[in-house]
């Protein structure tokens, strides 16, 4: 049995309308979830394939860190897909610095976060004091490096150039973004 803590305001997303999300996680990950909605504690017990069940804690964590249930469940669709979490509080000096760095990671009108997603193919969510990433290992690593550059104070232009180079490496130089 594994235990995961989910923020209070994400319990509803984890349970879903009428328990629908919880049941889908249980069915697809072959686990039983015991959710304490008072304190956000989630006990995860594998009841089927133990390898599939090992993915369930990451699905629960991803939903808890702001990902939509469908995005979190995509971890079951591709064995190479992974969830990673950067604790921004560990990278910042105080609450004001955390707020400033979150703003830099999100960018004006969300543009920096969007570019991280568009140019790497990973999904990126900034929630609370964390930056969550779901994607292939090389996509996750590219987002991690870009976020690290931003947190270290690199100008956004340098980060965007890095992401463009990574995009070309990941796609073989082809632009897979929709035109328009």
Image: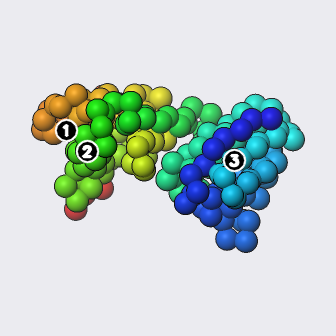
Image position, residue 110 (x, y; %) = 27, 55
Please give the label number shown on residue 96: 2
**CB atoms of marks 3 and 2 within 8 Å:** no
**N-terminal-most mark, 3 or 2:** 3
114 w.r.t. 17: above or below: above
Pointer 3: what residue?
41
What is the CA distance from the residue labelled 3 to the residue labelled 1?
38 Å
**CB atoms of marks 1 and 2 within 8 Å:** no
Pointer 1: what residue?
160
For the residue carrying disc 2, how many other residues have a C-alpha within 10 Å: few (<14), some (14-19), or many (20+)?
few
| Quarter that holds the C terminus | bottom left
Snapshot colouring: rainbow
The residue positioned farthest toward the right in the image shown: 47
Please give the label number shown on residue 117: none
| Quarter that holds the N terminus | top right
Task: Tell me: 16 left or right of 109.
Answer: right
Task: Tell me: 21 left or right of 120.
Answer: right
- Callout 1: helix, strand or loop? helix
**N-terminal-most mark, 1 or 2:** 2
Image position, residue 50 (x, y; %) = 80, 32
Q: Is residue 171 visible?
A: no
- Callout 2: helix, strand or loop? helix
Rendered residue at 16%/39% (across/down) = 156
Task: Tell me: 140 left or right of 39.
Answer: left
- Callout 3: helix, strand or loop? strand
What is the CA distance from the residue labelled 1 to the residue labelled 2?
25 Å
């Amino acid at each position: 049995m594994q235990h995961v803590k989910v923020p209070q305001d994400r319990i509803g997303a984890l349970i879903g309308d009428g328990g629908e999300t919880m049941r889908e996680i249980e069915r697809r990950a072959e686990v039983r979830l015991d959710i304490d909605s008072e304190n956000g504690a989630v006990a995860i017990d594998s009841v089927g394939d133990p390898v599939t069940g090992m993915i369930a804690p990451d699905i629960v964590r991803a939903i808890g860190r702001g990902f939509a249930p469908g995005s979190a469940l995509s971890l079951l669709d591709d064995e190479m897909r992974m969830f990673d979490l950067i604790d921004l509080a560990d990278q910042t000096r105080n609450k004001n610095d955390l707020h400033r760095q979150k703003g830099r990671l999100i960018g004006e009108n969300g543009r920096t976060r969007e570019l991280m997603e568009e140019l790497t193919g990973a999904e990126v969510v900034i929630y609370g004091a964390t930056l969550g990433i779901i994607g292939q290992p090389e996509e996750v690593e590219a987002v991690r490096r870009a976020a690290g550059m931003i947190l270290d104070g690199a100008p956004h232009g340098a980060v965007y150039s890095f992401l463009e180079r990574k995009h070309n490496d990941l796609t073989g130089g082809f632009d897979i973004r929709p035109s328009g």
